[in-house]
Image (cartoon, helix red, strand yellow):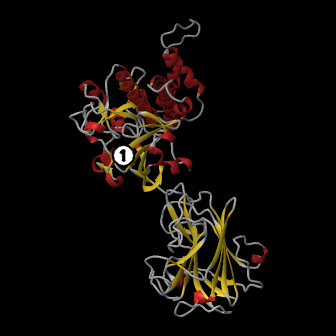
Amino acid sequence: MKKLLILLLAFAMLLPILSACGDAAQPADTEASPSESADTAEAAVTEEITEAEVTTAVETTESVKTEDALTVFRTTCYAAGKFNQSVLDSVNPGVLALISDCLYFEDTLQEWRAKGDRWVYTNQSKYSPQSTTFDEMIASNKHGTNCAMAMGWSLIDMKVLPSADSRFWGGSNGVWAHRDRTEAYMGAVSEIYCYNGTRTFKELYEAGMIKAGDMFLAVGHTFVYLGDEKFMATGHDSQYHVDATAPSEYGSSTAVFESFVVDMRSCHDFTTDVFWLFRFKDEFVPHYYRNADGNNVKNPMYSSVSRSEYRAGKDPATADIQYMNQNEYSKQNKDTPAKKNYEIPKAATAPVIDGVGGSEWANALKITLTRDNTVDMTSTKLECQGGTFSYMWDENALYMLAEINDATPSEKKSKAGNGSYNELDGVQMCLYVDKSVTSATAGKLYFFSFCPEASDGKAYAGEHFIFSNGSYGVDVPGIEIKSVKTSTGYVVEAKIPASVLAKSAPEIKLEAGTSFPLCNVILDTNNSKSAIFADSAWFNAPKTNVYTLK
């Protein structure tokens, strides 16, 4: 057994040498017969050789083959020399095959356009085949496409999807159309991210969460990001012109394609809400790819990676589907903060309400809000940018100073005087009259909304559950409020007089020893999504932080 293992090891070690030499002639004085080589190798071995060591030697040889095949694949694929080389060098085999396909589709479009052919946007086989490969569509002489076709054609070319009628796309409300018959195939070769419209492509891109080759489903839409700030756009996101004489179901609004590859920032895909994202796994090896001549050929890597678990064509019943954490880009805390107790000191001197703050707040209670000690009540996946709430009191009023960080000021402004200032940037204070209430009940709590800048440029204060019935907010007479913009956000300073806090039953008395549950809230919009960051329990007085007037 030992001799057999030695022979196997020697043979495995010689394979790379023999492969490199090929049929080249060798000097007579260095040539040796196979038996002589084996005898020499055996004589050099003095220690016990295990089967594991033989396996390692064979796997090393297999790795050399794989590297050679990878070189062939990368240098002969259609994308080689036709796209940003740094992108091509950085992507995995699946993405490289996808980019090659997409560039071939684009170049083919341009070749036919040069002949005077018109490729139309269509969703009907009458005008262009809907359940065929790209090559079959070309052969039909009915040339057209829609937003889902490029991704589908490529997945079929690579043999990820078994047939042309097993395509999928972004359906109504962002659903994964034909998920039932494509999920296992995609799960075998890609990571699947479900965002459900909570993030735009732009937000994900700017957060560093997008990679070349990512495939997207949106509401009634499908698109591919090629890298180098380019989309593969084969729908109404492409470059096209309207031609009423071109044959399609759209008549006078028929779109005729000019280019599928478009600049990212000039395309509406850039701001589209993402519902699903598919990203090829690094281990995935596509069975076929487009070579430099545009032919769909077998990938030399496919046969060399014999132990790969990510081959296209794998039995979908055993596919290892991975649904990735859609929140991984966000470090925002997701748990309700634990209940705490605070004491609000009495003001030695009542602050001037000018929106500036300053030394008069030096001895106030300061509560700092961050992404670590707040929770987003809307699940928008935004992160709390942070801020500080300061409190003081005297017999005349409760004073609040909110210093808020905001790198994305709201472009829209709340209507001045409407009282409901709870949809854009601002701060809120939820102060419970009933310490046992666990719901949003009118008469049981004050819910103040402080707007730093309304449509008339002024700051406003509204309230929802004592001065109103909870369905909407109303402006609160008597509250004095000012706000100032800063280089990092804004400041809101407010005076809530005793007369306002006496509106409830029972009233909130401004005297030492009075305590009440209170939740601080930062309202933040990035002009696409709006979040509500609370530092305590939401509409649950028993679990909310308690503040006591000292």
Compared to residue 243, the image places residue 533 above or below, namely below
**Residue 160, percent from left and from top:** 34, 38
Q: In x, y percent, where is residue 346?
A: 73, 86
Asked whether, in this view, residue 360 is left or right of residue 107, the answer is right
Q: Is residue 152 visible?
A: yes
User: Circle 1: is it few (<14), some (14-19), or many (20+) Cα within 10 Å?
Assistant: many
Q: Residue at x 73, y 72 (%)?
A: 357
112 and 252: which is toward the camera: 252
| Residue placed most toward the observer, 72 or 472 | 472
Amino acid type at mark 1: His
How many circles with numbers are drawn on the protein? 1
> What residue occupies the far left of the structure in this picture?
126
Q: Label 1 belongs to which residue? A: 221
Image coordinates for residue 215, horizontal then vertical, percent: 42, 43
In the image, farthest residue toward the front: 456
Q: Quadrant of the C terminus?
A: bottom right
- Asked if residue 156 is positioned above or below residue 481 in the image, the reply reads above
Label 1 residue SS: strand
Q: Nearer the viewer, residue 49 or 398?
A: 398
Picture layout, residue 106 above or below residue 440: above
Question: Which corner quadrant of the image does residue 76 belong to?
Answer: top left
Up-down: is 65 above or below 420? above
Is residue 450 toward the left or the right of residue 177 in the image?
Answer: right
Tell me, yes or no, if residue 521 can be seen here.
no
